[in-house]
Amino acid sequence: MENKKKKQDKPKYNMWQNTCYMLKVAADYKPSVLFTCLLLAALNIADNLISLFISPTILGKIENAALLHNVILTILIFILAQMTINSLKVYIESFSGYSYVMIRAQYLMGKWLNKQLTTSYCNLENQQVQKLIEKSKNALHNNMSATEVIWNTFIQIVKNIGGFIIYLIMLTYIDPVIALICIITSLISYFATNHINSWRWRHREEEAQYSHPISYINQKSQDYTLAKDIRIFQMRPWIDEIYKKFLTLYQSLIRREKKITIWANILDAFLALIRNGIAYAYLLNLVFTDEFSASQFLLYFSAVGGFNNWISGILENFNTLHNQSLDISVMREFFEYPEPFKFEDGKPLHEKDLDKYEIEFKNVSFQYPSTDNYTLKNINLKIKNGEKLAIVGLNGAGKTTLTRLAIGLYDPTEGEILLNGKDIRQYNRQDYYKLFSAVGQQFSQLESSITINIAQTEDNIDIKRIKKCIHLAGLTKKIEKLPNKYDTNIGKKVYEDGIELSGGETQRFMLARALYKNAPMMILDEPTAALDPIAENDIYNKYNELTKGKTSIYISHRLASTRFCDRIIFLKDGEIAEEGTHSELLKNGGGYADLFHIQSKYYKEGVVF
């Protein structure tokens, strides 16, 4: 068990693999970044060497009784060189930072968003994927993210390695033993502190258990749609209590981490005392035996301190790179998370080949991940081209799940779904999605204009078709009264002049969007749930016009609304219990008829709730 846990704790990609990955990203996307990193590292080394030699050089000239103007000239040369180097550094850093941002925000962030927007729908309901999404934000979402600051880490590593080599040559000239002692003590410090500092990575799953709920509560507390419920139901104390609970647990984890990492600092300070003490004692002995002049002592005294700084810098930079690598590894794991559906590697579907089609469920059963029960069991169903099919049943019968399987958002746990006799799993799923328009129970609209929201694009919008779809959905009067009409923005988070649609208006709006797509199959999942009876009746009367020339699947709890469909499927406990037309099912006197009579008696008896 312990070995298994260690294996799980280990990131998928190590520091060197992630370093190569980021260097390849730069080489492919912004090659200039690699050159500027090397140039900045060289300028930093040069700046350090000037600082190292300036005082010993001046002191040496004074010791040798150099003329005053020679001393002043030497000082001016050093100052001019340092000013030139610092000016170049500032100039290069001013434009290189933009390239770092572009790699993070445009390339990698774009890739991260694209993965979220295109990944198989079932992945988004996977807790492991949700954790990867949440944790990979650390590598991407601000200017201090690993994918942006890593370039500064690379610069520091190259600078410190270059300085280390130069100083190593200098100290070896005095005595190789001094250089060896500095190297050994620094390496011991690095490996010991690296193990201690990786404590947080080994406890990342525990951290996610606290950080994910905190992030979720923050997100929901800022959700405008929940603002009314929070106030009416006085949810603030409850939300505050939950937030504080997870925040306390998270803070406890951080305190445990700090107690562990303080030992790394103590060990590092102890080893630094040993190596510096030995080196300085050796140099003082050389001075007292007249083997070194004052200027030489100053030079090598500074070099010993600098040498230790180069070593410490290298090891600290690699520690930093290691920590940044952990975030990058999580990001890459999300990028490369396996797709259960085929996309570009699937067979293409051409619209010309789908003038006539039939979808068939063949012995289909479905079980949601991490559940013991089947939502659907052994479904056998053919949806014919142009058919108007209604799916009804009580809550939890599996109606919405069945349509999600038909659309291709899920693959069946058992059995297969066929399009014109062929398993849909072989096709490019993006092509398959083009067959469907849908109006679901959950609404999704972006803060943009009415026109763009319906067309779902900013290019080649057919305004005549927009108006026709809005008319069929019954929103023309509402929109024509608005000051900007079809250019009116929806939502108030982005636009000050944006409008908020009511629940019924939003449902009509979603219907207009589905009509505009003009897909051959339309899914209507409780499309009138938020409408008043008059508006609902208007939609029913237009149903044949709305679905003209299309195959449609209609889901409803209101059985009276299904009578205009060609066929009705009555689901019970995840199985097809009854099948037929409205009149046939009433005549059979089964579960459908019982449910219909229960609903209709409230209208007949005039019951008031």
Image (tube, rainbow, N blue to C red):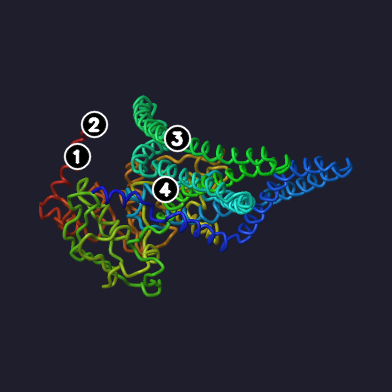
Whole-Å distance between the Cαs marked 2 and 1? 14 Å
Whole-Å distance between the Cαs marked 4 and 1? 37 Å
Report the mark closest to the observer, 4 or 2: 4
Mark 4 or 1, nearer chain start: 4
The residue labelled by disc 4 is 444
Q: Residue at x 39, y 42 (%)?
A: 504
Report the mark closest to the observer, 2 or 1: 2
Mark 2 or 1, nearer chain start: 1
Q: On residue 604, which mark appears?
A: 1
Mark 3 or 2, nearer chain start: 3
Dot 4 amino acid type = Ser
The residue labelled by disc 2 is 609
Along the line of sight, the residue nearer the viewer: 277 or 206: 277
**Residue count near mark 3 (Cα–Cα under 10 Å), binned few <14, some 14–19, many ≥20:** few
Dot 2 amino acid type = Phe
Report the mark closest to the observer, 3 or 2: 3
- Cβ atoms at labels 4 and 2 below 8 Å apart: no
**Residue count near mark 1 (Cα–Cα under 10 Å), binned few <14, some 14–19, many ≥20:** few
Along the line of sight, the residue nearer the viewer: 192 or 291: 291
Residue 74: % across, % down: 82, 45
Dot 1 amino acid type = Lys
Report the mark closest to the observer, 3 or 4: 3
Whole-Å distance between the Cαs marked 3 and 2? 34 Å
- Cβ atoms at labels 3 and 2 below 8 Å apart: no
SS for tag 1? helix
Whole-Å distance between the Cαs marked 4 and 2? 32 Å
